[in-house]
Image (cartoon, grey):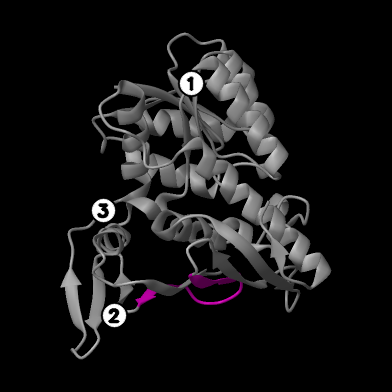
Amino acid sequence: MLNVALIGLGWWGQTHIRALHEKSDKVRIDTVVDLDSNLSKKTAGEIGARTAPSFEAVLADDAIDAVILVTPHSLHTDQIVAGAAAGKHIFTEKPFALSKSEAKRAVTAAEAAGIMLGLGHNQRYGAPQTVIKSMIDAGELGEVMHMEGNTSHDTLSGEHAWRHDVKQAPGGGLWHMGSHFLDLFQHYVGPITEVYAQALDVIIPRDTASALLTFECGASAYIGNVMVTRDNRMGNVLGSKGWAKMTSPTSVQIAMRGGDPKTMELDPVDPVRANMEGFADAISGTAPYKFTNQQMIHDVAALDAMALSIKSGKREPVA
């Protein structure tokens, strides 16, 4: 059992609790920490966990094996470096860092300390996404030509101050939600070479954002997010032999050239729990993790290029 400390008990910190508490036999939330000490005490009482006064106190606690960071993006790198120095495995929510140089600094510290890094791009573990990845790898869709991804909702349209900070998220929802597809699509077909992005202020800052991606393999993609609309999710892959679409968390529609679309019903998967348990398995040596450290850096390099494109209004290469 991996004993973890959860840092940050806001919207997504509570999602981790719902995914793991009394539901995982591999990961246990031992300690919770939040700037709001009353929230920490309340949450700890509800799930039978301990509280700690700070992130630094967690690092000094020998009972803690790993830390889950659900903290502002700008804190990730320094927290990873500090965690590595303390010998704690670190799972961080995305984006992994706010610049490629910071991402490399985090990875260098982790590798020097011999700790495992985890990343909250949970889409890699979804049931439809897993099927589509298998089809791509088996060549069933032929050559991947184009991909489309959009996760939009109004969850972050209210009082989530740091999430609306342009320094924390230069492209608004592309950093918070669209980046899931940026990572998923590089998981599908490999590195991104070029991006063109835009972010618009229609009702609130950066509430509508999108990007076009070009991949080393020759495929293209669109990713987008609207922060002030009804929940909407789309994930499509179009290949030379046919296409596959995520139609729900438990179904995928597949159509091959010359044939009719067919829907495949799938067993439900909690991708947040699956990712954390995959992280635990990697630490124990049971199975390899679905992410490499270099892929974590590449995600951030693509975000760097997107931020530059938003400013320049031009296509920008991914370093």
Kindly report the distance in space between the C-alpha atoms of the residues bearing marks 1 and 3.
Answer: 27 Å
Q: Is residue 280 magenta?
A: no
The picture places residue 6, in percent across and down from the top left corner, at: 49, 31
Query: What type is the residue that disc 3 sits on?
Result: Val
**Magenta residues?**
219-239
Q: Is residue 76 something one can see in this rendering?
A: no
- Please give the label number shown on residue 242: 2
Kindly report the distance in space between the C-alpha atoms of the residues bearing marks 3 and 2.
Answer: 25 Å
Image side of residue 292 versus residue 224, left or right: left
Q: In which quarter of the view is residue 233 placed?
A: bottom left
The picture places residue 42, in percent across and down from the top left corner, at: 49, 33
- Residue lying at 24% horizontally and 61% vertically, measured from the top left: 138
Sequence order check: which comes first, mark 1 or mark 3?
1
Kindly report the distance in space between the C-alpha atoms of the residues bearing marks 1 and 2.
Answer: 41 Å
Q: Is residue 223 magenta?
A: yes
Outermost residue on the right side: it is 312
Q: Is residue 61 something one can see in this rendering?
A: yes
Query: What type is the residue that disc 2 sits on?
Result: Gly
User: Where is 271 relative to 262, above or below?
Assistant: above
User: Where is 115 relative to 105, above or below?
Assistant: above
- Please give the label number shown on residue 269: 3
- Foreground mark, 1 or 2? 2
Q: SS at mark 1?
A: loop
Using the image as rendered, state which of residue 57 and residue 91 is in the foreground: 91
Query: Dots 1 and 3: beta carbons under 8 Å?
Result: no
* Residue at mark 1: 115
The picture places residue 8, in percent across and down from the top left corner, at: 56, 37
Image side of residue 263 versus residue 235, left or right: left
Image side of residue 146 versus residue 55, left or right: left
**Quadrant location of the N terminus?**
top left
Q: SS at mark 3?
A: loop
Q: In which quarter of the view is residue 173 placed?
A: bottom right
